[in-house]
Image (cartoon, rainbow, N blue to C red):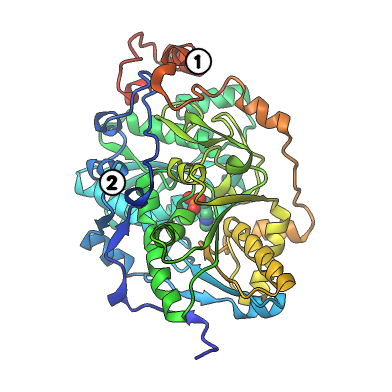
């Protein structure tokens, strides 16, 4: 028994509820604001973009939300996912630490993203929506939503960040195999994309730009809605099935975590793994250190500001209070495309401000080195995003070797890298650069770009003076746009 490597739950023990961490926090996260009024957005503002069920989940304070039977049926294709004890990696490191990883790469799309793609497609289809639009960074989210859309009979149009579109042709083919249409972003199909291309025809794109394009198209089509693969409360909540399973599996292994590390792009796999453990921590039943790992090239937690900002580049979304590098920040086209987001989940940002989690940033060469080490010991090639988590795991395990501590380290190996081998190839042939992001670059990205710096709607006069907002108002030629619902701004 002490050589056990996989901790498997039977389907009968698959969690039946998602966990909403908002119910247990000492204070709720600040609400999203309407960019025209500075007031919290209401369901009517969001209705052009999301189905009612997801809007209700976004603002819910219920502790548990039942997973619909139709979603559980699809989850059973790959869930529960295994929890592995990384015995070979431990031996290779010579660490007394015990390392566990929850592996989400066995899903049809190869990552944790179907955990939310499936319910999002389900709720849209249930409310009569026929088409979805979305953005994708690495192509993992786009593949996941393409898979889920195929199952629920939805048409899907995907804007894929140009850098990834060029680096990962097989992700595009996978999305098309599931029946989706894929455009590189920025594209000339939208105002947002054309605006970026006019300034920089060779733009490598960003998640912020791709979101603007997908939102613009959904908002202009009454039959369509928009789906987001990270950042929002309901998305993180759908991912909590990861942590709920992991709690049961670690208990079976007879361990409780001392340190939990996870990579953060918009925060969904990290929130999904850690929120159920945070509940246990808040209840005094365990006390793990919870550490987010972000790329040094896009360090929203560690070097961004905590302020209201747009979720997208064009400024079509509500204002979200989050750690941000500014919505015009375009990160270096690092290979971990899924981590190239200028902001961070508002819920996680709030939890970070409450001091309940910590964050570190890692350069990609350290992460790929960790990915190789993991592949050569555990056998699974991690996606570039979770190599950040693996690097932080290894760092902690080496610390344990120095101090002799037998810590229990848990992480999410949230996707495989079999369609990311070109990035590994670049690393192995020495072509991969670690660009240093200067303070000046961050200051420039933030300057003149943040519409609000406090959480009070009282800054409204500032807001209507904000250049991005004026540009938007001119673009849509609506003098009353300050009072129009958000979708009218597109
Ligand atoms: C495999 C993988 N991990 C992590 C991420 C980052 O997203 P999040 O922080 O929402 O988990 C992505 C995003 O595309 C991804 O594809």
Residue 121 position, x and y percent, is 30, 50
Q: Which mark is residue 61?
A: 2
* Quarter of the picture holding the C terminus: top left
Q: Is mark 2 within 8 Å of ligand 1?
A: no
Position of residue 276 relative to residue 47, above or below, is: below
Q: Is residue 171 visible?
A: no
Furthest residue in direction top, as rendered: 479
Q: Is mark 1 within 8 Å of ligand 1?
A: no
* Distance in Å between CA atoms under marks 2 and 1: 33 Å
Q: What element does badge 2 sit on?
A: loop
Position of residue 484 relative to residue 320, above or below, is: above
- Residue 225 horizontal side relative to residue 256, left or right: left
Q: Earlier in the sequence, mark 2 or mark 1?
A: 2
Query: At 49% across and 23% down in the image, what residue appears?
Result: 452
Q: Which mark is residue 466?
A: 1
Furthest residue in direction right, as rendered: 430
Q: Quadrant of residue 417?
A: bottom right
């Amino acid at each position: 028994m002490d050589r056990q490597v996989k901790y498997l739950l039977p389907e009968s023990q698959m969690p039946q509820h998602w966990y909403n961490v908002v119910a247990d926090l000492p204070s709720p996260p600040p609400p999203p604001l309407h960019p025209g009024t500075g007031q919290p957005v209401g369901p009517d503002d969001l209705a052009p973009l999301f189905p009612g069920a997801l809007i209700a989940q976004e603002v819910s304070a219920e502790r548990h939300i039942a997973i619909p039977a139709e979603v559980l049926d699809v989850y059973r294709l790959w869930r529960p996912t295994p929890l592995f004890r990384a015995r070979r990696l431990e031996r290779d490191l010579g660490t007394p630490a015990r390392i566990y990883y929850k592996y989400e790469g066995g899903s049809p799309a190869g990552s944790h993203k179907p955990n939310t793609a499936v319910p999002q497609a389900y709720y849209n289809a249930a409310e009569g929506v026929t088409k979805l639009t979305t953005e994708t960074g690495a192509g993992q989210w786009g593949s996941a939503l393409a898979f889920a859309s195929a199952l629920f009979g939805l048409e899907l149009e995907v804007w894929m960040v140009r850098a990834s579109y060029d680096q990962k042709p097989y992700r595009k083919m996978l999305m098309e195999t599931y029946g989706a249409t894929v455009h590189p972003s920025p594209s000339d199909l939208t105002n947002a994309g054309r605006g970026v291309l006019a300034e920089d025809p060779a733009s490598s794109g960003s998640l912020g730009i791709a979101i603007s394009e997908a939102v613009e198209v959904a908002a202009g089509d009454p039959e369509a809605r928009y789906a987001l693969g990270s950042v929002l409360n309901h998305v993180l909540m759908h991912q909590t099935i990861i942590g709920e399973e992991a709690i049961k599996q670690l208990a079976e292994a007879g361990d409780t975590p001392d340190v939990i590390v996870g990579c953060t792009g918009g925060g969904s796999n990290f929130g999904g793994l850690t929120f159920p453990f945070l509940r246990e921590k808040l209840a005094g039943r365990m006390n793990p250190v919870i550490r987010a790992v972000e790329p040094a090239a896009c360090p929203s937690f560690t070097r961004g500001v905590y302020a209201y900002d747009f979720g997208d580049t064009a400024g079509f979304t509500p204002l979200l209070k989050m750690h941000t590098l500014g919505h015009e920040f375009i990160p270096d086209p690092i290979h971990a495309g899924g981590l190239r987001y200028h902001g961070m989940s508002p819920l996680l940002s709030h939890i970070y401000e409450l001091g309940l989690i910590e964050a570190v940033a890692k350069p990609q060469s350290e992460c790929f080195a960790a990915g190789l080490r993991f592949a050569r010991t555990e056998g699974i090639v991690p996606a570039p995003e979770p190599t950040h988590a693996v690097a932080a795991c290894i760092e902690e395990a080496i610390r344990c070797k120095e101090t002799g501590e037998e810590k229990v380290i848990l992480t999410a190996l949230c996707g495989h890298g079999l369609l990311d081998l070109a990035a590994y190839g670049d690393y192995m042939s020495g072509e991969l650069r670690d660009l240093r992001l200067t303070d000046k670059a961050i200051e420039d990205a933030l300057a003149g770009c943040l519409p609000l710096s406090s959480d009070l709607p009282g800054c409204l006069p500032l807001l209507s003076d904000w250049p991005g907002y004026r540009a938007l108002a001119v673009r849509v030629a609506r003098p009353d746009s300050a009072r129009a619902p958000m979708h009218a701004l597109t």
